Image (cartoon, helix red, strand yellow):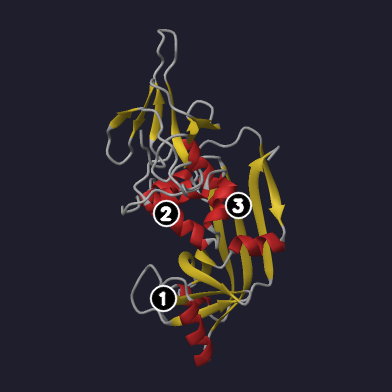
Amino acid sequence: MRAHLGDQLVIEGTKTSAARRDGEIVGLHHEDGTPPYDVRWSDTDEVTLVFPGPDAHIHHLEHGRSGIAHPAPAPAPGAAGPEAAPHGTSHPSDIGRRVTVERRRRNLSREETARRARMSPGYLQYLEERPADPSVATLIRLADALGTTVTALRGGGMDLPPGLGQALLHPELRDIGPEECRTLLSTHGVGRIAVRTDDGRPAVVPVNYDVVDDAIVFRTAPNSTPAAAVGTEVAFEVDHMDEALSRGWSVLAVGPASVVTKPMDVHRLTERAHTTPWAGGEREMWVSIRPTRLTGRRITPVDG
């Protein structure tokens, strides 16, 4: 028997009354993929060390085939530990790419993310680099560790407004202090700026932003709606909603907006930008918002 991280181990009951059991292989103890394995069982979500018997077989995630268990050969000299990742060249899945993007966006190492998600760093490496299909329980833990949602990691619901899930049974709405607000703003992302346009009407538009030297900065075009922020006091909002757990937070920054005019500052912002504006086009005018007030709110369970 040989397995890869992410394969499914199935134990078939040999007795009529015995229940079939299956789980996800989340840890390898031998580099060649031979037993034993660390298995996260689907019925309990617990991880145990398993030496498969004759009633066990492997469902290989990538090949869609099964293999009957055979006695494990002696470990090879210098065998890798339980966090060893599988070898081979494969393209990552969409879920793996989204996990990698979210992890890097939050400046989290693979080890720290794995610790938060209560999984092996080797298994997280497998999810990011191979065509994996993790369980719902695994996705929930990853989403919680990365501050995102299961739906977002799966790429679903892109055309639906957020917040369609059921409310918590006993929700608690609490204020967030300025320091936590700064942390949640992080270094970059997508936020919404509220402005008053040239015709006097209010407008709220999303922008790709960065945080540099405590200022919120974004690129736009001189005649665009976000450019109307220049020379006025504006509101800038970011939020996050976890559809799976029915919780979320929002941060509101209020302050004056101005154009960045010094060539050295413009060059520095352009060099440090994490991304170009998603809307595309010529957007070379940098706008800076210096928050004079930061407030936020978070929805959690009463005992959360």
Q: Nearer the viewer, mark 2 or mark 3?
A: 2
Marks 3/1: CA distance?
29 Å
Q: Is residue 242 visible?
A: no
Label of residue 249 in the image: 3
* Label 2: which secondary element: helix
Are there few (<14), some (14-19), or many (20+) residues within 10 Å of tag 1? few
The x and y percentages for residue 133 are 38, 41
Are there few (<14), some (14-19), or many (20+) residues within 10 Å of tag 2? some
Residue pointed to by mark 1? 224
Of the two numbered discs 3 and 1 on the same chain, state the one appearing first in sequence: 1
Marks 2/3: CA distance?
21 Å
The x and y percentages for residue 203 are 48, 66
Q: What amino acid is found at the position of numbered circle 1 in the picture?
A: Ser
Of the two numbered discs 2 and 3 on the same chain, state the one appearing first in sequence: 2
The x and y percentages for residue 183 are 64, 62
At a point 62% along the width and 32% down the height, the residue shown is 169
Height in image: 295 above or below 19? below
